[in-house]
Amino acid sequence: MIQSVLLVVVTALATWFIMRWVRWSPRPLNREQREIGSAKNIGTQLDGARDRASVFEIERNRLAVAKAVKAALWVTESRLNFAVPELLKMAQLWVGQSKAGSKKWKAPAGVTQIEGFDDPSSPWAAWTFEDHHWRIEGQWEPSILPEEVGEEIGACKVSVDEQVVLDMTISGKNREVMWIDALTVGPWVSDLLAFSGAQTFEAKARSSAKSARQNQERADNIRW
């Protein structure tokens, strides 16, 4: 009797262990299930790669924007946003003045090989000064920004010895730097500022002298 009871108990325990083992042991997957599992694994890997790429792109974009802002501030502080278009405005007239054959006009001291295109919307000027070839280009177009309807923006580019050292976009109204596409800081900056300042000073001096002569001529015709 006891043996029968023990046999029943042992059989029940064995059956219970076998059922648990069968329940928790991994069952062999068929081909469809294996493909589904593989697809899920690949999807998880791709999601992880996209997340990492997204974080990398955000960080890279943040650094790029910070670099562009720093360049715009540097150009603004150095006053290149004013000097470049002002120098272009004067230099684009040199070709016309040199071809006019006027004995009164002389090229700026040290300036040779003058070239240019006198066009208000897309001017450019080039010359050689102190063994360096300079070229300034400008292109002015209406702004597409809603808050700046009717205003112009200008893309100004400076090249020294056929290498672009500055490519900036500025507003036509107050010469505010809008963005920088290229900037190479070097000795050309001080050279351009000094050259532009000298030409501006001479232009103002000539204008002042002309005004003084006109005033004197008027005065000479006034008799009491």
Image (cartoon, rainbow, N blue to C red):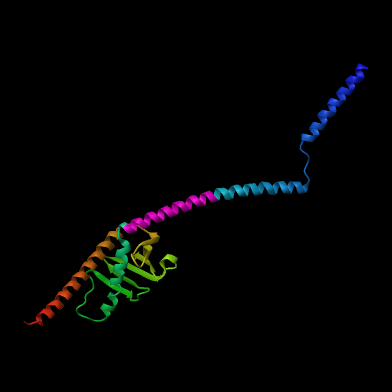
Q: At 21% from the left edge and 67% from the top edge, which residue is drawn?
A: 201
Q: Quadrant where the N terminus lies?
A: top right
Q: At 78% from the left edge and 41% from the top edge, which residue is drawn?
A: 28
Looking at the image, is 82 positioned above or below residue 43?
below
Residue 130 included in the magenta stretch of the image: no
Query: Which residue of the protein is positioned furthest toward the front in this rendering?
Result: 224
What is the span of residues highlighted in magenta in the rendered image? 54-76
Looking at the image, is 26 positioned above or below residue 93?
above
**x, y (%) of residue 127?**
30, 70
Residue 211 left/right relative to 174 = left
Residue 162: image quadrant is: bottom left
Q: Name the chief secondary structure element in magenta.
A: helix
Q: Quadrant where the C terminus lies?
A: bottom left
Looking at the image, is 71 positioned above or below residue 101?
above
User: Relative to the observer, which residue lies in front, 19 or 105?
Assistant: 19
User: Relative to the observer, which residue lies in front, 149 or 119?
Assistant: 149
